[in-house]
Image (cartoon, rainbow, N blue to C red):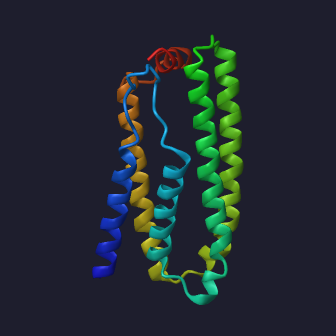
Amino acid sequence: MPKFVTLGLTAFLLSVSSLSYAQGPSSTGAMFDLPSAADLKAITDERIDVVKAALQLTPEQAKLWPAVEAAIRARADARYARLTKLAARVSDHRDFNAIDIMRGRAEALTQKAAALTKLVEVWQPLHASLDDAQKMRLRVLAHFVLREMRDDTDNRRMEIGLDDDGPLEFETMAVRLITR
């Protein structure tokens, strides 16, 4: 049990450390500042280590882990590339129209879906080999991560002025994001 409490506390501290990158507008006028590629790699390494420690893989299960780790890293790299591209577009102050915004969003969602599908495919054999205790630890960790993601999404919605009563029109939201 002490290992589980330590693991939970470690996961919490890792997620809080990544929140320091969620900054407001910078003095340079950019909408957001991205962490460096090295910082992202360090954060990804820490998160992977937490999941691996939580699972306490057997030697047989450890053989399946490299594919899972590679898929996690690929998703993190793809997310960073998408955010870098978005930051460049916003900092260029290019004229955006609704079609460009929707097309970019569609492309991003397609890329995210492909990466998530790959992650599911490599997780499936490992998940099937987990015992009940490992599955429980994974569920607890997933619950924690999902709660943190929900809280982060709520914070971002408040930052850009989305109402709790309902979503703003897509174009209005995009304009708010771009003109910040």
Q: Could you tell me which residue is drawn at 70 percent across and 43 percent down?
A: 111
Vertical side of 34 occupied by 94: above or below: above
* Residue 58 locus on image (x, y percent): 56, 87
Quarter containing the C terminus? top left
Quarter holding residue 121: bottom right
Side (left or right) of 81 relative to 140 = right
50 is higher (above) or lower (below) than 35 = below
- Place residue 112 in its image quadrant: top right
Whether 138 is drawn above or below 26: the answer is: below
Specify whether 73 is left or right of 142.
Answer: right
Q: Is residue 140 left or right of residue 2?
A: right
Quadrant of image for the N terminus: bottom left
Which residue occupies the foreground of this view, 98 or 136? 98
Q: Is residue 46 above or below residue 166?
A: below
Residue 159 x/y as whole percent: 36, 27
Q: Residue at x 69, y 17 (%)?
A: 99
Residue at screen point 43% across, 47% down: 149
Across and down, in percent, residue 103 comes to 70, 25
Q: Residue at x 68, y 69 (%)?
A: 67
Q: How many marks?
A: 0
Which residue is at the far bottom? 59
Q: Nearer the viewer, residue 37 or 152?
A: 37
* Residue 88 locus on image (x, y percent): 60, 26
